[in-house]
Image (spheres, rainbow, N blue to C red):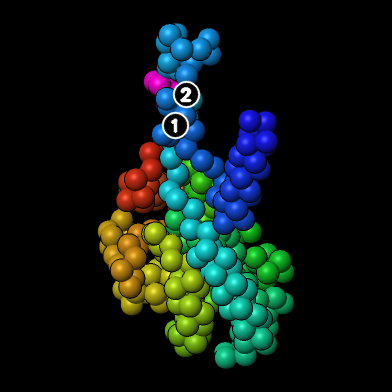
Amino acid sequence: MQENLSRLTGDILNYLHFLKDEGVRSLPCAAGGGRDWPAPGGPGRSRAPTRAADAACPKPRPAPRAASAQDSSNALLEIAGRVAACERCALHKTRTRTVPGQGHPAPDILFVGEGPGEDEDLQGLAFVGEAGKLLTRMIEAMGYGREEVFIANIVKCRPPHNRKPEPGESAQCLPFLEEQISALKPRVIVTLGGTALEALLKVSGITRARGQWLEYKGIPVMPTFHPSYLLRVPTAKRDVWNDLQAVLGRLGRAVPTPANK
Ligand code: URA
């Protein structure tokens, strides 16, 4: 009996290690057998209160996409390597560092901006300056952390003096973003500002397009204003928040409120 029990325990531990290696980070806490587990006190006493167990059990998250997350990480690293060596356009001559983009390799949401500014050029990371701080607050208001989404740009090198990327520069750089999108397989793409919308979807006029669902290769795209624009025109934050709530709706996620945060 004792021997069987320790073999069973060993098997369960091995299985849990296997699941962990596969990227599984949580298990349903009230599923199947757990629900029928006898209540403390033995047979004849009432069973564990299922409602209470359900209440204590966190809401199910989407199944982890472990295998594809690993493949995606590898692909993203490989793309970043090619970005670092890229000399396709003149922007490489004035860059300090390339900014391939960063975040979760299998995210719900991919945010796409225009191109790196000074802070991003120095750090090699997307959206880390003032506009980036606002983007972080937008992401957190949606109930995500920055590390749970992916943040990228149309061009991976800083245009001098923060000018807009020229159409030729965007066109040369776009294949990198397209490759990133096919690795990431985001559930939704949010384009930030007119340049991202125009380069990715060939749609011009952010003011008219924002808030309307579009599509990129079968992936829903929500165009919204760029955080830099919001720093200049804070009253536009209301429109952007509406757009981000539509994104949450599309993902089947509740809009965080102080009560459910
Ligand atoms: N603006 C962008 O479009 N991208 C960044 O990474 C930073 C500012």
Is residue 143 visible from the viewing direction of this image?
yes
Residue 68 vertical position relative to residue 136 in the rendered view, above or below: below
Tag 1's secondary structure?
A: helix
Write the residue at 46% across / 12% down.
43
Q: Where is residue 116 in the image (x, y as percent from the top left)?
A: 59, 70
Write the residue at 50% across / 87% down.
172
**Residue 53 drawn in magenta:** yes
Q: Residue flagged by tag 2: what amino acid is it?
A: Trp
**Residue 170 drawn in magenta:** no
Tag 2's secondary structure?
A: loop
Residue 35 vertical position relative to residue 251 in the rendered view, above or below: above
The residue indicated by pointer 2 is: 37
* Frontmost residue, 84 versus 167: 84
Write the residue at 62% across / 90% down.
87
Q: Are marks 1 and 2 in contact (CB under 8 Å)?
A: yes
| Residue segment shown in magenta | 50-54
